[in-house]
Each structure stands twice: as C-alpha cells, then as structure tokens.
Image (cartoon, rainbow, N blue to C red):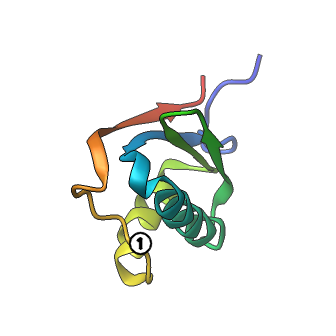
Amino acid sequence: MLTNTEESPVNVAMIATHYPQPAHREEFVTRVRKVAEVFRGMPGCLSAEIWLTQDTVVSFVRWESDEAFAASLPALGDADVDVAFDEREARPREIVRLVAA
C-alpha cells in the first residue's frame, strides 16, 4: 500500500461551486474558463476543469502538492482574471479543498 511520504507528494484539489445570476451565466462561464487557463499554466497544476449544471458552474482544479496549490492562489492576483464576488452571483460560492487519501 502506498503511503504519503516525501517521495510521494500529496495531491491537493479544490472544488468551487458558483451560482451565477441567469443573466450573467455565459459571462461567468467565460470568467471561470480564464481562471482555469491561468491555473493550467502554473507549475504543479495537474488539471483544471469546468463542469456545468443548469444552475451552477463548478470548477475542479488539481495540484501535485500542497506547495503548488499554495503558490498558485496568490498568482491569480497577478493575472488578468476577474475573480470578484459581486451581484453577478445569486449566492456565495462554495469552495472545498481536498487532499488525496
């Protein structure tokens, strides 16, 4: 059985569920796609995907380590992406950080 050691870094993921207002849905999908592109270009990002339901936009991002995860979040501030929460969203985002077992 594989255990998490320094030789086998722990994968980290983040799932963000967004609830855009219907009038802003397409704009919001475009915004989340741009954020995913930024994440994909960062060292240690394994994947960045966007999934849709009728009412939500769900982003799922995986990193190879906690260090890569931690380094990527501040880098969003330097990128030309809109991550502001405002009236374009019907309710607050739900963000969950996961660690591989």
Q: Which of 30 and 79 is in front in this view?
A: 30
Quadrant containing the C terminus is: top right
Residue 96 point in image, percent of width and height: 40, 34
Write the residue at 69% across / 41% down: 8
Residue at the far right in the pictured view: 1
Residue at image position (64%, 59%) is 45
Q: Where is residue 59 in the image (x, y as percent from the top left)?
A: 55, 46
Circle 1: residue type: Leu
Q: Using the image as rendered, state which of residue 7 and residue 20 is in the foreground.
A: 20
Residue 36 sits in quarter: bottom right
Is the residue 35 above or below the residue 87 in the image? below
Label 1 environment density (alpha carbons within 10 Å; few <14, some 14–19, many ≥20) = some
State whether residue 30 is above or below residue 65: below
44 horizontally vs 78: left or right: right
Q: Is residue 98 above or below residue 79?
A: above
> Residue furthest toward the top?
1
Q: Residue 29's x, y, as percent?
A: 54, 57
Drawn side of residue 72 relative to residue 50, left or right: left
Residue placed at 74% from the left, 23% from the top? 2
Query: Which of the 4 image quarters holds residue 88?
Result: bottom left
User: Where is mark 1, residue-wise?
Assistant: 76
Residue 1, located in which quarter of the rendered image? top right
Q: What element carries label 1?
A: helix
Q: Residue at x 48, y 49 (%)?
A: 66
Toward the front, the furthest residue is: 23
Vertically, is 33 above or below 12? Answer: below
**In the displayed structure image, the side of residue 65 where residue 7 appears, left or right:** right
- Marks counted in the figure total 1
